[in-house]
Amino acid sequence: MAVKTIRDKDGVLAYNTGTWEAPVWVPIPNCHNHKATAEKDEIEVTSRATGGVETFELGNAKYMIEWEMLLITNENGVLDPQIAFFRNAHINETVVELWSTDRGLTTDKSGGPHFQGKISKCTPIYDQKGITRYSFVAKPCWGDQLAEFKVYVD
């Protein structure tokens, strides 16, 4: 499969609290191990004309953003509001707009997956002390706006 992955020290994962037309991007400061992937299906098109050589064409694109958040609670035991937001979005199947940028939010030269999607996985990760972090996966869902992979080339 054709895969493009963004994992960059300058990369930022953000969610939109505005609208698609007038976004207000909020970075996720407690985001760790952030990975954004764009991949395309492979469709085999081998025929007699290829002389026995397997040949492929590319099909539908698949976008996915994965990240982890450390479990943070305040002195009263209240969960970090961003963890609660994404956990509740998973439970309630709420659509969230995400953008995984490769150069931060302050430049028009940023690229990466941008889509309205749903949190398909929300996994608590345990160690000897109990839950220490949450792992999330988001994928595009059907909506008014199509998923896009913004690309900027120097």
Image: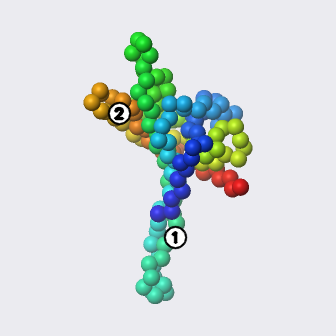
Counting other residues with Cα less than 10 Å from the Cα at mark 1, is it few (<14), some (14-19), or many (20 or more)? few
Q: Residue at x 31, y 33 (%)?
A: 126
In three-dimensional space, the C-alpha distance between marks 1 and 2, rounded to whole angstroms, equals 38 Å
Please tell me whether residue 19 is drawn above or below residue 101 in the rendered image: above
Total labels: the figure holds 2
Q: Which residue corresponds to the image point at 65% horizontal and 53% vertical from the top-left?
A: 151
Q: Position of residue 63 (x, y in %)?
A: 51, 50
**Amino acid beneath label 2:** Pro
Residue in the image at 66% along x and 38% along y: 105
At numbered mark 1, what does the secondary structure look like: helix, strand or loop?
A: strand
Q: Position of residue 76 (x, y in %)?
A: 41, 12
Give the crowd class for mark 2: few <14, some 14-19, many >=20 residues within 10 Å: some
Q: Taking 48 as reference, is 81 above or below it?
A: above
Q: Nearest to the eye among marks 1 and 2: give it.
A: 2
Q: 83 and 121: which one is in front?
A: 83
- Can residue 138 be spotted in the picture? no
Image location of residue 36, percent across then percent down: 52, 47
The label on residue 57 is 1
Mark drawn on residue 138: none
Asked whether residue 13 is in view, the answer is yes
* Above or below: residue 84 compared with residue 76: below
Residue that lies at the very extreme toward the left in this rendered image: 128
Q: On the image, numbered disc 2 is attached to which residue? A: 124
The image quarter containing residue 128 is top left
